[in-house]
Image: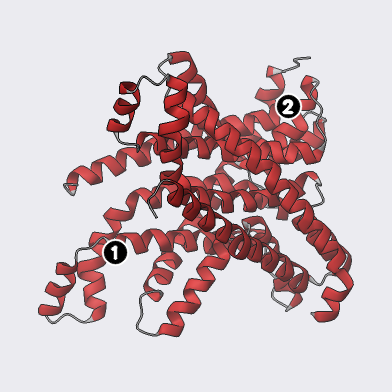
Amino acid sequence: MLDFLVLYWPRLLSGTGITIAQFLAAAVLGVAISLVFGLAKLSSTLIVRGIATTYIEVFRGTSLVVQLYWIFFVLPLFGLTIDNFTAGYIAVGMNIGAYGAELVRGGILSVPKGQWEAAVAVNMSGFQRMRRIILPQALVNMLPPWGNLMIELLKGTALVSLISVGDLMFQARQINASTFLSAQVFGAALIIYYILARFMLTPCMRWLERVMARKLGRA
Amino acid sequence: MFDWRWEFVWQILPRLIEATGNTLIAAGAGYCIALVLGLVLALAQRTRHRWVNMAVNEFVEFVRSTPLILQIFFIFYVGPQFGILLSPWASGMIAIGVHYACYLSEVYRGGIDSVPKGQWEAATALNMTTMQKYRRVVIPQAIPASLAGLGNYLVGIFKDTPMLSVIGVAELLHTANAIGSENYRFLEPYTMVGIIFLAISLPAAGLVRMVEGYVRRRMGL
């Protein structure tokens, strides 16, 4: 196992770097999409609500692999060619965004009605009310489920290896194909994913939860 | 630009429907494994032996935070290294079964925790053994409470079956890949796969919500 790691750590490391890059890009996209569609789903306009519902149901109703293939192989037929790295994080981000939109919606609905009324009473505009009163409180309420969603997102990035993005999963498959040291290479990859999720992502989310709770005086 | 051919759709539809059958079988078989193994894991997390609890907890955490596709590869390729030859179907079912068992164990745990303490005490007062308590008092009440979670993961498994195509299980996506490369047309097969997934998972999710509502009313929640 040790000489295996000595020999192949540069490739595993570069794969981990790509996985982290995919994760960050998809997370930014996913959070933005969640906010937009989460708010759109609460809109009073029927068309806006309909678009948001359709988006959420389509992306939650089909699987990420299918979405990934569709974006990478079918969109070029419509004249929209994207390279595999971009297609990867777009697919993962859009998928997670659909799940996140439901969390945003739930978080906003969980803010007590009195907060809305108080914001109206002090003459805030709709935008001010959302940004300064509702969203900060909604954010605290929905952060714990977001932690789980972020782990799902990290796991989702493993699928971009199927369109040949050189992430950790891809490197592991390549090394496996040339050496047949399956237990070592896939074992190492499993452990790296576990470390990323359990010892980097989860503590970050816990820290964020604490910071947000303190800012709202709830700690 | 828009080159959708209906006659091609009709031509490939029978093959896709046949593959949908395989997808459903894979999801069903994986789910059965997960249902049983999940309950075992949930009960193992509640034994009096601290080491067993900790080991099972760690295992569940590990499986839940690593990608299913990597686990599928791990099981498919590592077996032969030690002389155990598994078919794509067998290794796929094991991977999906174990992966979702870890999720379901959390659902079961929530259900078991929701059984009021008085029920345990009453069972103890009736001089039931631990086995009897679980089988006759706790689990019958825990299952209805966890039905919604169990149903959601059934839909989840169904949506994760396309990952089995990477090790050559002839499910829906695998068939669409094959059709696409035979005919050099990917628009229709991939789009049809998406539509078939929607057509099954949306009603299924609706059904889960209905059952959930029904059970909640029946239990007076």
Chain letter of the residue beneath label 2 in the structure image: B
Q: Position of residue B120 (x, y in %)?
A: 18, 72
Q: Position of B119 compared to A212: left or right?
A: left
Q: Foreground: B191 or A45?
A: A45
Q: Foreground: A122 or B127?
A: A122
How dense is the environment of label 1, judged by Cα within 10 Å: few (below 14), some, or many (20 and up)?
Answer: few
Chain letter of the residue beneath label 1 in the structure image: B
Q: Residue at x 26, y 72 (%)?
A: B134
Q: Residue at x 82, y 65 (%)?
A: A176
If you read the primary sequence from the N terminus, does the residue marked by circle 2 or circle 1 appear first? 1
Quadrant of residue B106 in the image? bottom left
What is the C-alpha distance between the residues marked 2 and 1? 48 Å
Q: Position of residue B95 (x, y in %)?
A: 59, 62
Q: Nearer the viewer, mark 2 or mark 1?
A: 1
Query: Measured along the vertical axis of the image, is residue B130 above or below residue B91?
Result: below
Q: Secondary structure at mark 2?
A: helix
Q: Secondary structure at mark 1?
A: helix
- Label 2 in the same subunit as label 1: yes
Tag 2: residue type?
Leu
Whether residue B154 can be seen here: no
Q: Position of B205 compared to A33: left or right?
A: left
Mark identifier at residue B187? 2
Tag 1: residue type?
Asp
According to the picture, the residue beneath numbered tag 1 turns out to be B113
Q: Foreground: B16 or B156?
A: B156
